[in-house]
């Protein structure tokens, strides 16, 4: 159902880049930045002066929109901060679970065919709420980072920003360099080369962890006969403009609506700037007539879309039936564009079916858990025989011995 991703061909290109940057650091990364992005400078660090200038260059309305989105995203994500807990599992045995922020994180902000300050907000805000000590961002560019992205980075209190992207940027932050500290986990979307690079560094013990595996962007719209065809078409087109490898799908119980949507797509597409990209994405896409909304939801759960739009009557009543989706948009006015930018939910989501096993980026994504146990003398006596028996069942006598030694020498 999804277009195939030719991973092996991409890996063949990416593997030598990663190996080179791992061995030679910034020198190698700059070589590839020049080759693929036309970046000619030797200094990739964004200066404070550049950030201040970006804020001055950005018009008031753009700053107002970014700040409004920031407020909503922050408000929603603040509620995600996880709670520690402690419990006495047995008399004398106290077990607890604590959340700790990942200390060093890297945020990849795509910078190819689109400028994405929204992605900076979606990654920078939860990183700060989590309490990460060092937040480093990176983005590909030929010369300078877009002012809107730098302004978003400033209000997210990003510590470092580097003018580099692609597989070389991922490798540079994953392994570090004498002038750039490595990160412990990398976040953010990217093209197939970035995705491949993230995958490869994540399986290298010397590399870094990543947020999630991913593929091309996608949306699945479920619409009934009452849906406005222009709304449906607009939502499909908005996702199709992400890339030629994107996929947009319409499931509807109405043949009439399906035909109307096709007409609307042709009509609206004429006036869109990225229509060539849209045309490429539409080749991967389709409309499917279903017997009922229930059948459409069943098919959607099997597909596990990144974005799911329910443009149907009484959309709320179907929430319990949805089990696999990155982010869900309920009702005719819940455009996916709103979630992409400013409603408050995160737009960095699992794609390519990974919504079956992954959720979108959250505050918890920037944290890890630790467990603690404190066993006093009473607790030890209560649990000693259980541990000895279990250790003997597994024939791990050193484990049992650690208990027996304490039994013999206890006061």
Image: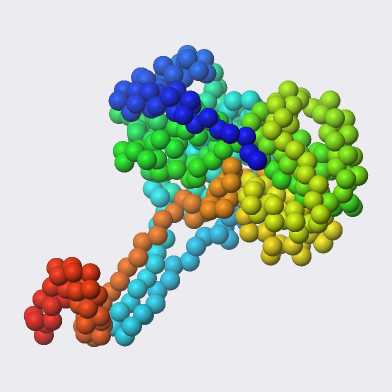
**Residue 165 spot, x, y in % from top left:** 49, 27
**Residue 312 spot, x, y in % from top left:** 82, 55
Residue 260 in view in this figure = yes
Residue 137 shown left or right of residue 77 in the figure: left
Q: Is residue 289 or residue 327 the one in the foreground?
A: 289
| Residue drawn where x is 31% and y is 23% of the image | 24
**Residue 315 spot, x, y in % from top left:** 78, 59
Q: Is residue 115 or residue 351 the one in the foreground?
A: 351
Image height of 390 relative to 73, above or below: below
Question: Which residue, as the protein is rendered here, is positioned at the far left?
Answer: 409
Residue 186 shown left or right of residue 54 in the figure: left
**Residue 123 spot, x, y in % from top left:** 54, 44
| Residue drawn where x is 49% and y is 31% of the image | 7
Residue 151 shown left or right of residue 251 in the figure: left
Which image quadrant for residue 167? top left
Q: Quadrant of the N terminus?
A: top right
Image height of 409 relative to 37, above or below: below
Q: Quadrant of the C terminus?
A: bottom left
Question: Which residue, as the protein is rendered here, is positioned at the far front?
Answer: 291
Q: Is residue 123 or residue 59 the one in the foreground?
A: 123
Residue 315 shown left or right of residue 100 in the figure: right
| Residue drawn where x is 61% and y is 29% of the image | 147
């Amino acid at each position: 159902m999804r277009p195939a991703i030719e991973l092996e061909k991409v890996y063949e290109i990416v593997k030598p880049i990663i190996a080179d940057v791992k061995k030679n650091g910034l020198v190698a990364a700059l070589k590839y930045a020049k080759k693929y992005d036309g970046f000619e400078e030797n200094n990739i660090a964004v200066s404070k002066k550049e950030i201040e200038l970006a804020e001055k260059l950005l018009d008031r309305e753009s700053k107002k929109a970014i700040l409004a989105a920031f407020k909503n995203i922050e408000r929603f994500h603040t509620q995600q901060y996880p709670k520690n807990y402690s419990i006495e599992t047995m008399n004398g045995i106290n077990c607890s679970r604590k959340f700790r922020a990942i200390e060093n994180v890297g945020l990849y902000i795509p910078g190819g065919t689109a400028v994405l300050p929204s992605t900076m907000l979606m990654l920078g805000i939860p990183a700060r709420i989590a309490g990460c000590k060092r937040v480093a961002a990176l983005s590909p560019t030929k010369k300078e980072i877009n002012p809107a992205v730098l302004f978003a980075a400033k209000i997210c209190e990003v510590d470092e920003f580097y003018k580099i992207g692609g597989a070389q940027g991922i490798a540079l932050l994953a392994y570090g360099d004498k002038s750039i500290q490595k990160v412990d986990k990398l976040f953010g979307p990217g093209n197939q080369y970035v995705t491949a690079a993230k995958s490869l560094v994540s399986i290298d013990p010397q590399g870094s962890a990543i947020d999630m595996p991913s593929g091309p962007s996608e949306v699945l719209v479920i619409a009934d006969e009452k849906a406005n065809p222009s709304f449906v078409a607009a939502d499909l087109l908005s996702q199709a403009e992400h890339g030629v490898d994107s996929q947009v799908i319409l499931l509807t119980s109405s043949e009439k609506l399906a035909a109307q949507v096709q007409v609307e797509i042709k009509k609206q597409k004429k006036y869109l700037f990225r229509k060539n990209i849209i045309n490429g994405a539409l080749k991967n896409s389709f409309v499917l007539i279903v017997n009922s909304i229930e059948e459409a939801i069943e098919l959607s759960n099997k597909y596990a879309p990144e974005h799911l739009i329910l443009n149907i009557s009484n959309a709320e009543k179907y929430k319990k039936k949805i089990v696999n989706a990155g982010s869900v948009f309920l009702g005719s006015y819940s455009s996916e564009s709103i979630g992409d930018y400013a409603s408050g939910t995160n737009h960095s989501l699992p794609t390519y079916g990974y919504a079956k096993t992954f959720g979108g980026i959250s505050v918890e994504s920037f944290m890890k858990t630790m467990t603690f146990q404190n066993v006093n003398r009473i607790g030890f006596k209560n649990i000693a025989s259980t541990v000895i028996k279990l250790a003997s069942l597994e024939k791990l006598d050193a484990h049992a011995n650690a208990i027996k030694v304490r039994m013999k020498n206890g006061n």
